[in-house]
Image (cartoon, grey):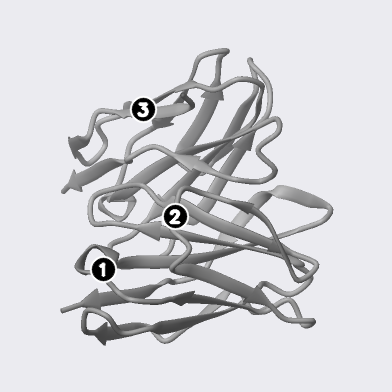
């Protein structure tokens, strides 16, 4: 049973560029959440997708956007990258039967130069 | 403001030396409290969910407990492979499934 997968593993971008990160949820899961984790901090909630719609959003600017596809996979897009966007981006999935318990992927390490 | 505070920030133990990590929270309508383990550069690994005061969960050398204001993660006779950052998170009523995390406790167990 495959867990949550994310791609790419690492990414280096320069300020002002745009980036797309991808996530495939755990088998049987239909809800995907994205988190940003700065070094030495706990993950911060970006947004959550369910039934291809953004259901809730954290305190992140509109430069952060996402999408969920019919197969429940998801993308996180970040425009106009800033140095402060450098972080580990985590995707988590959960199921309708146990919506609160979220399982995380390995993350994508984004470095903005 | 909803907050989760973990203490200590870092903990160094000798192998076999038992201890406890603390997670205190100030949220309205706690729906669940979660413990995760995170190894460096990896995603958090789910450990436990606690829903009500008095509840306890165990897994190998770890035991999590919950009161109305805090949770403890007890580590009994730890081994070096228990070294990791332990994260606490909460979900509150009206917050859908948004996890609010603490900053974590970095645990180092030395042989």
Q: Nearest to the eye among marks 2 and 1: give it.
A: 2
- The mark that comes first in sequence, 2 or 1, is 2
Looking at this view, is A58 or B69 the one in front? A58
Is B26 on the left or on the right of B18, as rendered? right
Q: Secondary structure at mark 3?
A: strand
Residue B15 image position (x, y, % from top left): 22, 41
Q: CA distance from mark 3 to mark 1?
A: 24 Å
Q: Chain of mark 1?
A: A
Q: Residue at x 16, y 48 (%)?
A: B111
Q: CA distance from mark 3 to mark 2?
A: 22 Å
Residue position marked by numbered label 1 in the rendering: A86
Residue position marked by numbered label 3 in the rendering: B5
Looking at this view, is A30 or B65 the one in front? A30
Q: Residue at x 84, y 53 (%)?
A: A97
Q: Which mark is residue B7?
A: none
Q: Chain of mark 3?
A: B
């Amino acid at each position: 049973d495959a867990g949550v997968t994310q791609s790419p593993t690492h990414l280096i971008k320069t300020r002002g560029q745009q980036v797309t990160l991808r996530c495939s949820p755990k088998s049987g899961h239909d809800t995907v959440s994205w988190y940003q984790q700065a070094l030495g901090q706990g993950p911060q909630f970006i947004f959550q997708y369910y039934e291809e719609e953004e259901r809730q959003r954290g305190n992140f600017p509109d430069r952060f956007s996402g999408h969920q596809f019919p197969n429940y996979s998801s993308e996180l897009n970040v425009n106009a990258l800033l140095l402060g966007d450098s972080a580990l981006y985590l995707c988590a999935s959960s199921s309708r039967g146990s919506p609160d318990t979220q399982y995380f992927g390995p993350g994508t390490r984004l470095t903005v130069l | 403001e909803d907050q989760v505070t973990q203490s200590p920030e870092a903990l160094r133990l000798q192998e076999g030396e038992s201890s406890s990590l603390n997670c205190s929270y100030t949220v309205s309508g706690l729906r669940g409290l979660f413990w995760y383990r995170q190894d460096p550069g990896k995603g958090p690994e789910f450990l436990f969910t606690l829903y009500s005061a008095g509840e306890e969960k165990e897994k190998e050398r770890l035991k999590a407990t919950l009161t109305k204001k805090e949770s403890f993660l007890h580590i009994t006779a730890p081994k070096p492979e228990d070294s990791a950052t332990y994260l606490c998170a909460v979900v509150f009523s009206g917050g859908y499934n948004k996890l609010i995390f603490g900053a974590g406790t970095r645990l180092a167990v030395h042989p």
